[in-house]
């Protein structure tokens, strides 16, 4: 997951985090439920 997000940031330089990530609450799967992002230039 971390490598995928780094690759996305390299290819999309305007991608920024827009809020706190929400993690899954599961004993079987670990990961993010939501990851709010903003795409564009900061003005």
Image: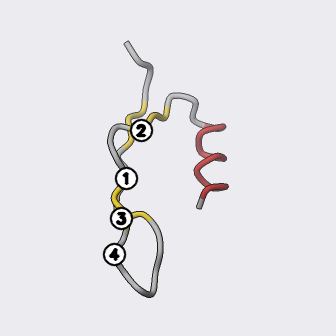
- According to the picture, the residue beneath numbered tag 1 turns out to be 21
In the rendered structure, which disc, 2 or 3, sits on the residue that comes first in sequence?
2
Above or below, 18 against 21 in this view is: above
Residue 13: assigned label: none
Residue at 45 percent across and 34 percent down: it is 16
Mark 2 Cα shell of 10 Å, populated few (<14), some (14-19), many (≥20)? few
Above or below, 33 against 6 in this view is: below
Of the 4 image quadrants, the one containing the N terminus is bottom right
Question: Marks 2/4: CA distance?
Answer: 21 Å
- According to the picture, the residue beneath numbered tag 4 turns out to be 25
Q: Secondary structure at mark 1?
A: loop
In the rendered structure, which disc, 3 or 1, sits on the residue that comes first in sequence?
1
User: Does residue 41 appear left or right of residue 2 in this picture?
Assistant: left
In the rendered structure, which disc, 4 or 3, sits on the residue that comes first in sequence?
4
Between tags 2 and 4, which lies in front?
Answer: 4
Question: Marks 3/1: CA distance?
Answer: 8 Å
- Residue 4 appears at what percent x and percent y? 62, 55
């Amino acid at each position: 997951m971390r490598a995928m997000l780094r690759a996305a940031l390299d290819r999309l330089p305007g991608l920024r985090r827009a809020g706190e990530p929400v993690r899954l609450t599961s004993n079987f799967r670990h990961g993010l439920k939501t990851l709010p992002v903003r795409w564009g230039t900061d003005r």
